[in-house]
Image: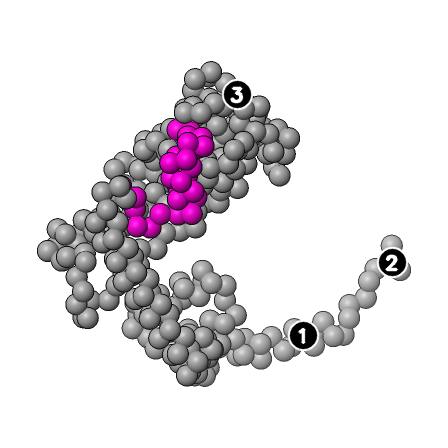
Amino acid sequence: MDRYKRERSPYRQRRRERLPYRERRKERSPHRENRKERSHVLTYKQLQKMPLNLRKKAVREARNRQEKIQGKRKERKRNPQDVPTARRLRNDFDRSEHNAMLASTAQELRRILQDFETLADIPHDITPTELRGEIAIAEGKATTIHVQRDGLSTLNVVLHQREPTIAQLKRAIALISRAQHKRSQRERYEERLRRRGIAADDDSDDRQPVVVAVASSTGELVHSAQRNGHDHRAFVSWRFLWRCFGLLNVDTNQPIDDRRSGGRATLKELGIENAATLKFVHRVKYFGRQRQR
């Protein structure tokens, strides 16, 4: 067994002899504490290497310790859109002039409509779809559909086509609901001004005309967006709304298959007569889960 015994390496003995040197090396040097203090200093270079959550945490802790972040801060790139140029200033001026012209035209149109008794019930911001519907009512060729909404006012959709299709009805519902939503926002704004003692039709030069903006799509078009007394308007598209909601014929209590014939089916083919009452319902309840289009 002795021949298989491993001989001791001469380097092992040398390592043992150097142990006192290693012990002395472990002793703290005066530069070690300075190095440790420097390691706690936060620099902008360290912040760039950190993820966003740790970067915010480090900045917050340094602010609580009232320590200044060392190094040179990287300057943010200036957005070229923020640089005022002659062309942008001219465009801003043209835009403000255009908005002022729209506001004055709407005010003058409102005065003209109020002077005629037959046109007093027509809003000054009537949409082309609503105007064609009013003309069709006067000619006796209109198709009126009432659409009920949960927690909101009933939509009175007037179609001017001779044989309207379900796609034209859906498009008219989207346009009229958006127009009514915009009018309700404008009425709230005017009521707020009236409560503050400011006339809505004030023509003073100091007061700039405010154009009431409405989102291109909002969740308060199909059902009420009030939750716990507050307005919660989720911005969604009409494509999403029609994928989630369908129409139910209240008179026959039957759901309407608006995807029949690719939306080209007429209202008569779907059993919808003039002055019918429809209602928004969840599509999954009547048609099940379908593949998204």
x 34%, y 55%: residue = 213
Of residue 15 and residue 166, the one placed in the foreground of this image is 166
x 63%, y 34%: residue = 262
Does residue 54 sit above or below 291 in this rendering? below
Q: What amino acid is found at the position of numbered circle 3 in the picture?
A: Gly
In the displayed orientation, state which residue is furthest to the left.
197
| Residue 244 appears in view | no
Q: Specify the label residue 15 is tagged with.
A: 1
From the image, state whether disc 2 or disc 1 is nearer to you: 1
In the image, the segment drawn in magenta is: 121-146
Q: Specify the label residue 109 is tagged with.
A: none
Using the rendered view, name the quadrant where residue 279 is placed: top left
Q: Is residue 228 left or right of residue 219?
A: left
Q: What amino acid is found at the position of numbered circle 2 in the picture?
A: Tyr
SS state under label 1? helix
Q: Specify the label residue 4 is tagged with.
A: 2
Q: CA distance from mark 3 to mark 2?
A: 102 Å
SS state under label 2? helix
Of residue 15 and residue 273, the one placed in the foreground of this image is 273
Inspect the magenta stretch and tell me whether residue 27 lies in it.
Answer: no
Inspect the magenta stretch and tell me whether residue 144 lies in it.
Answer: yes
Which corner quadrant holds the C terminus? top right
Label 3 neighbour load within 10 Å: few <14, some 14-19, many 20+: few
Q: Which residue is mark 3?
A: 271
Q: Is residue 184 left or right of residue 207?
A: right
x 36%, y 52%: residue = 214
Using the rendered view, name the quadrant where residue 130 is placed: top left
In the displayed orientation, state which residue is furthest to the front.
139
